[in-house]
Amino acid sequence: MLTCCAQSKSRSVAAFLLISMLFSCILSSTSSEISDYEYQGSDPCEFIDDLSFDSNSANASITWQTDLGPRLPGSNASQNLRTSIIENLSDWTFEESSHQRENFTLTNLVGTFSPLNSTGQNVVFVAHYDSRYMAERDENESMRDKPIDGANDGGSGVAVLIELGKIIPQMNLNHDVTLFFSDAEDQGIPGGGYPLTWSYGAYAWVENLTESYKENISAYIVIDMIGDKYLDFTKVTDTSNQLWETIVPITAALGMMEEETDCNGEYGIEIFNPNRTRGVIDDHVPAHEAGIPAINFIDINYGEDAERWGGYWHTHEDTADKVSAESLGLIGNILEIGLKSSAWTLEPSQVNNVELDNNPTINSDSNLDYSTQKNIEKSRAVGYISIIIVSFILVLILMADISLKL
């Protein structure tokens, strides 16, 4: 009896070890698929002397936007802003989409630039163009129920995207670029929990994307509240660490990181701190939840010595005079260098390249475009997983057979 039990236990252990090995195969296979592509941009200093982002024009856009009046969803000011964006970026293909939310209709504006030699990858830049419908943090209680100018919170991101849109067609890129002007990001209920009443436009856009479209997005970069004269930003929660890593060499090159040297060999000042992370609910969250690599440039200390979510934020002091052309230019330069250096273009990883070089059959895929390669990899993954599942079933059958014999 003891012998019988010992044999049963031994066989069970063997079967368990075999199952564990199969699960290890699943995990390693999954890990391999994730690491097949990585960001491999060029040295940012190669492009530092050839920047064309116009920070003064971006700053002038702030005043023009605020002169329109509050850009609330469904307002004439909102419509006039969208019309102006389309007219000023004639090289882009634009599409508007309207969505009903709560008691208002929001309208997203999406511009696409797709060069003839595009690989199919898509870098998406996002800025909300709506302004806040109330000033709940204003010192004057009688003014708290009135909409704000939204010069920085709304205007600054739009200004950067417009100027970026003017220069992208001359960059000779080999991938698509999308400018997403989201509506109703800032119409949330103060202190509201879940379900979220913020980022309505971004959620509506992401929810309507096809799987293939989402898979081709190599980077989803949100720009929000970056016009403050006292610019200061960090990483934020619910974002891609791998994508943040591409920002470090660019900001260092521009002298925006303390204890890091710029392209002239001089130490920078602390504008971007990659060692800190702040909690932010913004338009990056819907993308992150959908598995899209996303980051967010946002300065939540609005004003000199302002605390987090303090200063001029959500007050009637969020006016054009608080916004700096220099700050707009720094963010614009980050995005311009990122595009020119291919910082957000995914390439086969170095490890994967070695494996491909040793396998002529697999190496032939390297001449295919990004979308086709991803489809091939998906097919391989399905094949691997199918084999593992079948093996797992056979192990179960084997265990059942052993139990019956015992």
Image (spheres, rainbow, N blue to C red):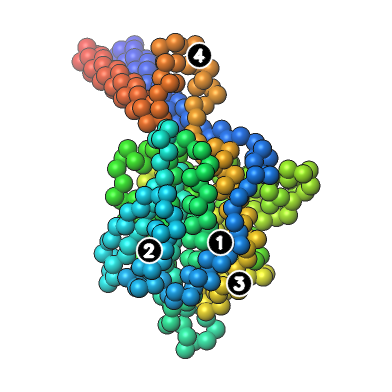
Residue labelled with disc 3 = 322
Separation of disc 4 and disc 2 at Cα?
Answer: 51 Å
Quarter holding the N terminus? Answer: top left
**Percent of width and height locating residue 249:** 65, 42
Inspect the image, locate mark 4, and give the three-letter code of the amino acid beneath it. Asp
In primary-sequence order, the first of circles 4 and 2 is 2
Q: Is residue 97 above or below residue 350?
A: below
Inspect the image, locate mark 3, and give the three-letter code of the amino acid beneath it. Lys
Decide which of 199, 339 is in the foreground and name it: 339
Inspect the image, locate mark 2, and give the three-letter code of the amino acid beneath it. Thr
Residue labelled with disc 2 = 83
**Percent of width and height locating residue 113:** 42, 45
Inspect the image, locate mark 1, and give the three-letter code of the amino acid beneath it. Ala
Q: Is residue 321 above or below residue 363?
A: below
In primary-sequence order, the first of circles 3 and 4 is 3
- Seen at 61% across and 34% down, the residue is 42
